[in-house]
Image (spheres, rainbow, N blue to C red):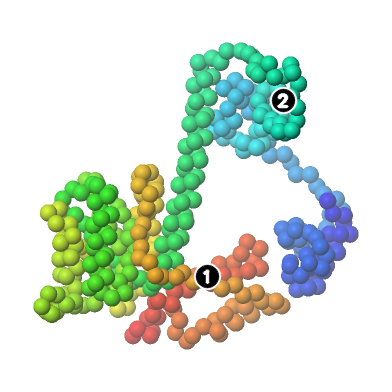
Amino acid sequence: MYSYEDRIRAVELYIKLGKRTGATIRQLGYPTKNSLMSWHEEYERRLDLPSGYARSKPKYSQIQKKKAVEHYAEHGRCIVATVKALGYPCRDLLRAWIDELDPDSRQRVVGRAVSAPRLPQLKKQTWEHVGVLSDQAYEDRLACVQALEEERRQANLERAAKRATTRVRHLCKAAGIDTLLTLTYAENMKDWGTLKRHIKEFNRRMSKLIPGWFYIAAFERQKRGAWHVHMAVHRLPPELEAKGGVKVKSFNVIRAVWRAVTGEMGGNIDVQSKKRNSARAPSRIAAYLSKYMMKAYEEGDPWSNRFSSSKGVTVPKPERIRFVGYTMLDVAVAVFDDLPDHFSEQLSWRLSRFKDAMSWVLDTNIRPRWEAA
C-alpha cells in the first residue's frame, strides 16, 4: 500500500519526465508499471487521486462460495469436476474456499525432512481407515482424474501447435517462399512411414535437379484417408534439363520425379506460383500451411512431426530499438525515413497495451505494385 503522498509524487514525476514509466520507476524505486499507469489514468480523470484505497466488490457472493464447497463435498471431492460443473471459480480459489469453510474435508500431503526422527508410535501406524468409498464417488474420482489428464493433454497440444506454426512462419519469411507445390497419390496410400520415405527421396532428387532447393511441407489426410503433401518452395524455373540435355517444362519433370518415387502407387502434382502482380506473401503461404498443421493437431494424430523442412536457413532475431524522449509520431516518422524507397506493400503494425510501444512487421519479399508496373 502506498500513501497519498507517494502516489501523487509518482504521478507528478511521471508527467514531468514525459510519461516515461521506466525513468520514473528507476528514480523513485516504486511502483510497478501497471500501478503507475492506473494512477495516472485516475489522476487525469479526477485531476487528483483518492486519499485511500476503495475496496472492490467481491466477485462471488457467500452463497456461491457455500454452494461450490457443498458440491465439492457431495460429488467425490474433486476440484476439477466441481469447477467444470459449476463454471466457477478457478481451482486455486476453490481450494481457498474449502480451507476456509470446510478445512477438514481436503486431504493434504505433507512432506517431512530426511533428518527429522519419527516417533515410535508413528512408525507402526502407517494408515488409518476412515470409511468406505461409494461406487458413485469412485466413478466421480476416476472421471476427475481423466478430465485433468485430458485438460493437460489439450494444453500441451496447443502449446506445441503454436510453436510449430510460429517456426513455419519464420522459415517462410526468412527463405522468401513464393510457390505452393502439392503432391498427391493415385492409390489410397495411408501409411505414414511410406510417406516419409517418399518425401525424403523426392527432395533428395530435387536437390540434384535444382541447386539450392528448399522446402517446407505440411501433411494432410484426404477424406478417403490417403496422405498428400502441401509444400512451400521457391519459384520454379520454367524449364529443367532432362536426360540427354533436353529442355523440358519444369512441371513435367517434377511430376516425373514424384511418379518415379511413388512407383506403382502413382501420383500427381499441382503448382501454384505467385503471379507477376499478385500480393502472395511468404506470410500468407505460411498461414496456408499452418491451417493443415492445426487440423492435424486438432484431430490428435499420434505421429509427431506436423511439418518438415530443409536445413540451412537461419531465422534472424528481431531488432529492438528504444527511443527515449520521442513521441509516438516521431518514432513512426524515424522508422519510415530509415526504410528504402521501395521496401514492401505489406505492412502491419500494433500498439502495446499501454500505448507506450509500437511494433512494425513488414515483408520485403513483396514488391510494391507501383514498382512491379
Q: Is residue 292 above or below residue 281?
A: above
Q: Nearer the viewer, mark 2 or mark 1?
A: 1
Give percent across and percent down for residue 36: 76, 61
Residue 85 visible to an observer of this rendering: no
Numbered label attached to residue 97: none
Residue type at mark 2: give it: Pro
Q: Which is more toward the observer, 222 or 149?
A: 149
Mark 1 is surrounded, within 10 Å at the Cα level, by few (under 14), some (14 to 19) or many (20 or more) other residues, namely few
With 302 as the anchor, is 196 left or right in this view? left
* Image quadrant occupied by the C terminus: bottom left
Mark 2 is surrounded, within 10 Å at the Cα level, by few (under 14), some (14 to 19) or many (20 or more) other residues, namely few
- Quarter of the image for residue 69 reads top right
Q: Is residue 53 above or below residue 267?
A: above
Numbered disc 1: secondary structure: loop
Numbered label attached to residue 317: 1
Disc 2 and disc 1: Cα gap in Å?
Answer: 51 Å
Give percent across and percent down for residue 346: 44, 74
Asked if the residue at tag 1 contacts the one at tag 2, i.e. Cβ–Cβ closer than 8 Å, the answer is: no
Numbered disc 2: secondary structure: loop
Residue type at mark 1: give it: Lys
- Quarter of the image for residue 203 reads bottom left
With 71 as the anchor, is 310 left or right in this view? left
Residue drawn at x 52%, y 70% is 317
Residue drawn at x 64%, y 17% is 127
Q: Which residue is mark 2?
A: 103
Give percent across and percent down for residue 112: 71, 31
